Image (spheres, rainbow, N blue to C red):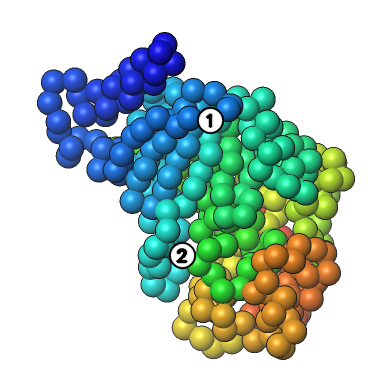
């Protein structure tokens, strides 16, 4: 009985905080228009609620008022932002599912039940989230960082469902990091990829220590193998350099063999529509998400795509790329 009363009170506080205790003023809260329903979530991990938005089902034991009020609008803003990276918006017919836990213990307990063969790997993540079988699973690591990882993993969730071909690791992770930095304004959320200080600081440190990963190695790497190495510097280098490489393709004005669209836009559009210029065996590999994305997969598909869309003169491209890295870390 106490649990039920607590959940109802939490739901009331959520609605009261978002709508105002006296009257409904939907135009004052983007969170309200993003929320379709709120109900009790019965589970074995903790007291919980289910928040439903136009595109998401969010199951959460994290009952902090601020988080509850902001997360519906945040995820809907992220969904809209993902679509801006495509030639045309896509619409999902089935809501995406997110699990957001109050603490790491709950998150690990759930992961052991949910993660299958990957559970141990996921539990080795020091602080963050993961996307498994189209579901995003996160826990509270502080309001700012929690929202950042939700937007990051939300990109994996989004392209995993809608793109015909899965992206090479450097591109998938690089794009995901474009959604880690954001600002809130008037109840809405705006993503600011050029202001990601966490990745920029890591990139600057990698450059300073002369630990940059050569471009040919970066584009065939698998983040799981990097994480397994337990070398913090290697992890920082892979992620920060992938972030910088995506920004380089977006911002440095590189065209794609005379096409009007740039390299970045063409890579994503052709992945979405299944138009990558690959042989039949590689196309099958790129489309089959049941096969682990190994070093071999990244090497075969990632290298081929990079050469086709970006170019084969690695020496020149790497020179320009490193100059770009220095530029964005110096600003």
**On-image quarter of the N terminus:** top left
At horizontal 69% and vertical 32% (from top left) the residue drawn is 108
Q: Residues within 10 Å of mark 2 (few under 14, many from 20)?
A: some
At horizontal 82% and vertical 52% (from top left) the residue drawn is 225
Q: Nearer the viewer, residue 243 or 146?
A: 146
**Percent x, y for residue 205?**
74, 42
At horizontal 64% and vertical 35% (from top left) the residue drawn is 110
Residue 197 visible in this rendered orientation of the protein: no
**Percent x, y for residue 285?**
72, 76
The Cα–Cα distance between marks 1 and 2, rounded to whole angstroms, is: 36 Å
Kindly state the secondary structure of the residue where label 1 is placed. Answer: loop
Q: Which residue is mark 2?
A: 85
Query: Mark 1 or mark 2, which is nearer to you?
Result: 1
Q: Nearer the viewer, residue 214 or 306?
A: 306
**Percent x, y for residue 295?**
82, 64
N-term-proximal mark, 1 vs 2:
1
Q: Which residue is mark 1?
A: 43
- Quadrant in the picture for residue 70: top left
């Amino acid at each position: 009985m106490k649990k039920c009363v607590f959940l109802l009170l939490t739901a009331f506080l959520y609605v009261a905080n978002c709508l105002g205790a006296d009257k409904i003023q939907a135009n004052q809260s983007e969170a309200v228009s993003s929320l379709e329903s709120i109900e009790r979530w019965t589970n074995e991990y903790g007291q919980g609620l289910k928040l439903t938005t136009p595109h998401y089902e969010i199951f959460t034991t994290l009952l902090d008022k601020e988080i509850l009020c902001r997360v519906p609008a945040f995820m809907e803003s992220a969904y809209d932002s993902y679509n801006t990276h495509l030639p045309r918006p896509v619409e999902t017919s089935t809501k995406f599912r997110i699990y957001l836990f109050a603490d790491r213990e709950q998150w690990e307990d759930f992961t052991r039940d949910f993660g299958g063969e990957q559970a141990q790997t996921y539990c080795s993540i020091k602080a963050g989230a993961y996307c498994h079988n189209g579901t995003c699973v996160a826990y509270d690591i502080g309001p700012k960082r929690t929202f950042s990882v939700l937007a990051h993993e939300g990109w994996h969730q989004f392209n995993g469902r809608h793109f015909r071909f899965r992206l090479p690791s450097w591109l998938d992770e690089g794009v995901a990091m474009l959604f880690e930095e954001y600002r809130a304004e008037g109840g809405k959320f705006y993503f600011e990829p050029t202001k990601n200080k966490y990745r920029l600081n890591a990139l600057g440190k990698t450059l300073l220590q002369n630990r940059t990963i050569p471009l040919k190695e970066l584009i065939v790497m698998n983040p799981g193998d990097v994480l397994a190495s337990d070398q913090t510097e290697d992890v920082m280098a892979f992620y920060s350099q992938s972030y910088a490489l995506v920004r380089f393709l977006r911002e440095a004005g590189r065209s794609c063999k005379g096409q009007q669209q740039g390299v970045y836009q063409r890579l994503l559009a052709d992945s979405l529509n299944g138009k990558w210029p690959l042989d039949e065996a590689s196309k099958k590999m790129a489309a089959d998400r049941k096969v682990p994305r190994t070093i071999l997969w990244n090497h075969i598909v990632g290298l081929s795509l990079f050469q086709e869309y970006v170019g084969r003169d690695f020496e020149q491209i790497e020179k320009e790329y490193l100059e770009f890295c220095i530029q964005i870390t110096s600003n």
